[in-house]
Amino acid sequence: MAKRKPVSIRDVARESNASLTTVSLVLNKRDGRISSATRERVLKAVDKLGYVPNRLAQSLQAQKSGFLAILVPELRHVFADPYFGELISAIEEAANEAGYKLLLEVAHKQDIEQKRHVELFQRRFVDGLLCLGSTNRDDFLGDFVGSDNAVIIVNNHLPALSLNSVMCDYRQAGVLAAEHLIDLGHKDIAYIHGAAEVQTASDLRESFEARLASSGIKMPKNHAADGLYTEAGGAAAAAQLLKTNPNITAIMAGNDKMAIGAIAGLKNAGLSVPKDVSVVGCDDLQPSLYSDPPLTTIHTPLDEVGHRACTAVLALFEGKQEHVTETLPVSLTLRNSTCGPRKIR
């Protein structure tokens, strides 16, 4: 069968007995000076012929692509992760409200080596790039330093690079978690951390330990363990901490997944949460509400971060802002995984 020739703007002009300029103005909604009768005639022709505007041609004319890209790290099941899902959903919502579509990009090693992240802008595939899960090891992001490209780091910051960022206040988060455990009377406290190359993870841990130290509570090195940002890692870390420090009465975890895993690890060791050991998380994602017991955690406004990051990257693209550095406040969400310390015999 012969392939049907696509309907062109010329076909619409011929069918509606209007000029190409008039049809173009109607299709691009710049028809303020065109009569309603002519506008109606053009739209009827579009409907009759089944004309579909060429999005690429429109975007070139408007000097924008109409797309934003989200760059995520090369992690297993990254799009199924509740943390990334929360941010991506918020960004999509804000992008949709602004008339934009999203491209989801994974930072595969071979793509980074071939500078695909730069090519997104060079070939005008996207108007802005939002980077999730960035770390201090992501040297390739330095390609954007000093450029006119609209790039923003979402819920993190990279001290070595002067890049735009919108994030939660993880230093405040560490202080709030420490003060909660101090107020409850805990003194033998352990910490389950994530990757040190994630700057906000370092900020959280440093501020937590500093606040404890200001109250005379020291945290020896063997009071910390890597939970790998996973539930399984949190469970293993809790078991390790109990083995070397059987007298601990509280654990702070760098995210909710590790905290929920820690609760499971403590239960497997025959301990009760919070009666024997209190547990605090960070993020306040949906699963924390349904852990057993429900998790006391630091609420980080990820939905707001996603929305504001999207708004900010569009402002950068449109030239309404030159630089963005925004830090949103966090708060303590009290549930049932914390209480006063048990009496040590």
Image (tube, helix red, strand yellow):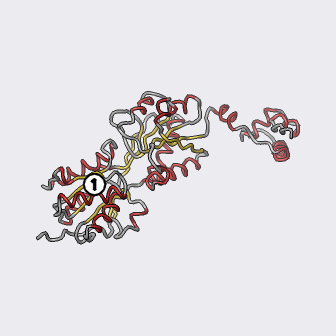
* 14 vs 40, nearest the viewer: 14
Q: Is residue 104 left or right of residue 169?
A: right
Label 1, residues with CA under 10 Å away: few <14, some 14-19, many ≥20: many
Above or below — where is 260 with respect to 156? below
Above or below — where is 54 with respect to 167? above
Q: Amino acid at mark 1?
A: Ile
Above or below — where is 107 with respect to 79? above
x and y percent of residue 270 in the render?
25, 70
Q: Is residue 202 left or right of residue 148?
A: left
Above or below — where is 340 with respect to 145? below
Quarter the C terminus occupies: bottom left
Q: Quadrant of residue 132?
A: top left
In the orientation shown, which residue stands out farthest toward the left?
345
The residue identified by callout 1 is 192
Q: Quadrant of residue 2?
A: top right
Q: Quadrant of residue 238?
A: bottom left
* 28 vs 293, nearest the viewer: 293
x and y percent of residue 159 in the render?
33, 36
Quarter the N terminus occupies: top right
Count of numbered circles in the view: 1
**Picture residue at 84% right of the left edge, 44% below the top:** 49
**Picture residue at 30% right of the left edge, 63% below the top:** 265
Q: Secondary structure at mark 1?
A: strand
x and y percent of residue 88 in the render?
50, 50
